[in-house]
């Protein structure tokens, strides 16, 4: 089935009722996709400060701090505890479980954070004639831990996670131009062509997602990634945290062009 033609509401409802559990690359092109972090309120102030100090890997889409998991800004009928295809549960910084619904874990002491995602810009790359191998091979985009340090805030500290896409050498400038105009989706790449410069030892063994071959006429291009908070949580070790599973995002009702008009 071609899920790309679904509306964001249709996709969220299908996920909510457990009809769908698929990676969201290519889903609802033109609409924002969001990474998720849910924490207890005692951590929320420091985490919000962390995001504001690190807007490249953590562009803020919405903060849900009113005791409800229902979105008010990015989606009219959204619920961050049911509308993401796959979630991760962390305890004391350790991944303990992947589940399809986290409603039973939510309480009024929790705060949710929706964070911008590079999957948002992919339809513009495709429209510009830039091939994306993870689309063609039906894989998740590969993601890597790096040595790029985030600005710490309170207990939260750690390094960037990046996503990688092999891009034809003659299309790299265009890819940089397109994504650089979209800071809400991580903006321009943080590294091009030299994985070792950011601490990536082997591009064929990603820390998250699936490996992609890099052709002789391509270079690996790395963008900041919203999986960064998961790496940060493993370093900071909050007693409890919920996140999306890498590659499985919250689909918003807001279109990228709506944010472009505000920049």
Image (cartoon, helix red, strand yellow):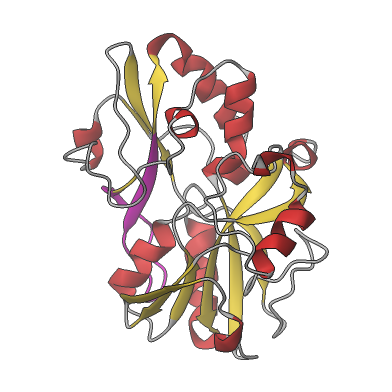
User: To which quarter of the image does residue 217 belong?
Assistant: top left
Q: Quadrant of residue 224?
A: top left
In which quadrant of the rendered view does residue 246 lie? Answer: bottom left
Residue positioned 48% across, 51% down in the render: 247
Q: Is residue 1 above or below residue 88?
A: above
Extreme-front residue of the structure:
1
Q: Position of residue 152 (x, y in %)?
A: 37, 64
Residue 40 spot, x, y in % from top left: 52, 85
Query: What is the count of numbered marks?
Result: 0
Residue that protrudes farthest toward the left in the picture: 201
**Quadrant occupied by the C terminus:** top right
Pick whichever, 80 or 74, lies toward us. 80
Vertical arrangement, residue 15 with respect to residue 212, above or below = below
At a point 43% along the width and 56% down the height, the residue shown is: 227
In the displayed structure image, the side of residue 110 where residue 198 appears, left or right: left
Choose between 71 and 62: the one closer to the eye. Answer: 71
Q: Nearer the viewer, residue 156 or 139?
A: 139
Q: Position of residue 114 (x, y in %)?
A: 61, 62
Q: Which residues are magenta?
A: 145-164
């Amino acid at each position: 089935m071609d899920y790309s033609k679904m509306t964001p509401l249709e996709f969220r409802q299908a996920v909510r009722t457990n009809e769908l559990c698929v990676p969201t690359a290519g889903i609802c092109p033109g609409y924002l996709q969001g990474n998720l972090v849910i924490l207890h309120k005692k951590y929320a102030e420091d985490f919000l400060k962390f995001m504001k100090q690190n807007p490249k890997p953590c562009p803020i889409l919405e903060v849900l701090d009113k005791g409800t998991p229902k979105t008010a800004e990015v989606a009219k009928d959204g619920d961050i505890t049911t509308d993401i295809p796959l979630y991760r549960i962390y305890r004391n910084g350790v991944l303990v479980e992947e589940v399809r619904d986290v409603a039973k874990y939510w309480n009024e002491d929790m705060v949710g954070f929706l964070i911008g995602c590079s999957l948002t810009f992919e339809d513009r790359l495709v429209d510009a004639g830039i091939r994306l191998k993870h689309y063609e091979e039906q894989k998740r985009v590969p993601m890597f831990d790096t040595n790029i340090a985030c600005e710490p805030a309170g207990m939260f500290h750690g390094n960037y996670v990046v996503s990688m896409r092999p891009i034809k050498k003659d299309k790299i400038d265009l890819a940089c131009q397109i994504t650089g105009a979209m800071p809400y989706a991580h903006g321009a790449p943080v590294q091009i062509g030299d994985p070792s410069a950011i601490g990536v030892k082997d591009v064929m063994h990603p820390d998250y997602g699936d490996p992609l071959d890099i052709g002789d006429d391509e270079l690996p291009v790395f963008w900041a990634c919203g999986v960064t908070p998961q790496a940060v949580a493993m370093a900071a070790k909050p007693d409890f945290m919920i996140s999306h599973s890498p590659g499985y995002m919250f689909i918003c009702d807001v279109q990228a062009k709506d944010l472009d008009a505000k920049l």
